[in-house]
Amino acid sequence: MSFTLPVPDAMPGDLYGRRERDPLLRVLERLMNAHMHSLHLWHRKDVVGERNDRRISVTVVGRTVEAYDENVVGLTLAGAGELPSWRPGAHIDVELPSGRLRQYSLCGDPADSTKYRIAVRRIPDGDGGSIEMHQLRVGSRITIRGPRNAFAFAVPGHGSSADHLHFVAGGIGITPILPMMRLAHRLDLDWSMVYTGRSRESLPFLGELVEFGDRVTVVTDDVDGHPSAATLLRGSNENSAIYACGPMPMIGALSRGVDPGAEFHFERFSAPPIVNGVQFDVELSLTGQRITVPADKSILDAVKPFRPNVAYSCRQGFCGTCRVPAAGRPDGMLICTERSDGEKVVLDL
């Protein structure tokens, strides 16, 4: 169960600047508290924030290497004028020259309406989207959609008993967390963070985290081993609101370690695991081809080898990119997450 109340149209400025507390920020903090939700363990797809489907042509105006292993690049994007506003946790859809559509969290300053910043980890054995993003250079032009927010950030206060924020980021999962941290720091809130990954060399934006001092704990597999839930929750308490972004094993560990009554918001890199699935067939109506969907795979994964250009993005069921018309289903079918209980599904593909 959750509820949604209005949030302000503007974010406090200077997330990268001054940090002294003033009366205006106290007012803004109280306004933002209206976007708090019930204390329960949930996936934030149930509470989708602002959504903007406008297509915008942007130019890459900055490109930086953000990790010592050189596998993460930061891209700064600018349009012809002001870009749509956004709040921490938001992402944009990027239309790549190949036709691929990929999502990337905004990790810059929401107060700067002239540009967006994203970061992309290169995945050599992936499906090619990250490699294509790494090939972009200053001057490259791409089209984006958004921003959208399915990982909305709410400041503790009204509507919540949380009096502390605890952030957990796994590798490139730092991207939506970084603006949240900066806002918490700017508002002089009580917060802590655990940042985890394979090695320090693989972690982006380490240099930007120095200013936060011992609020940030860095834990790496090569030195500390795979982190337990207790390690990931180090610095939190029974009254903490937890925001996490990272791979499924990390989110799974947190889900098992967080108290069932805690406020836990998360965003993961991949689709949720399929539990108690059954095998079924899909028929592609354009050709009559029948494809078997295994009990442990999504329709998307089963169809992709036969329809490599099928559109998808988030793989979590909230962006709607992969929705396909389906016989007997007025709203179509989200082929990244929705399944059949064994009956054949006819898709308009």
Image (cartoon, grey):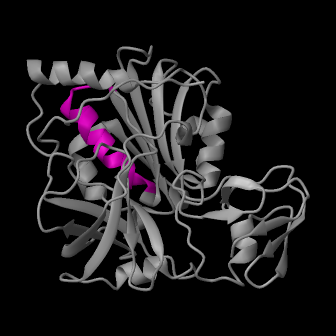
Classify 96 as above or below 336: below
Q: Position of residue 60 (x, y in %)?
A: 21, 75
Task: Report if residue 22 is visible in the image.
Answer: no
Q: Position of residue 99 (x, y in %)?
A: 45, 81
The rendered magenta stretch, by its main secondary structure, is classed as helix
Magenta extent: 173-190
**How many discs appear?**
0
Placement of the N terminus among the 4 image quadrants: top right
The residue at the point 60 percent across, 76 percent down is 310
Q: Is residue 342 left or right of residue 319?
A: right
Q: Is residue 305 left or right of residue 171?
A: right
Q: Position of residue 158 (x, y in %)?
A: 36, 14
Magenta stretch encompasses residue 121:
no
Q: Is residue 79 left or right of residue 305?
A: left
Task: Report if residue 24 is visible in the image.
Answer: yes
Picture quadrant where residue 77 is located:
bottom left
The residue at the point 32 percent across, 36 percent down is 215
Magenta stretch encompasses residue 189:
yes
Placement of the C terminus among the 4 image quadrants: bottom right
Q: Nearer the viewer, residue 54 or 94?
A: 54
The residue at the point 51 percent across, 62 percent down is 198
Q: Position of residue 279 (x, y in %)?
A: 90, 63
Classify 233 as above or below 169: above
Q: Nearer the viewer, residue 310 or 324?
A: 324
Classify 316 as above or below 160: below
The residue at the point 44 percent across, 82 percent down is 131
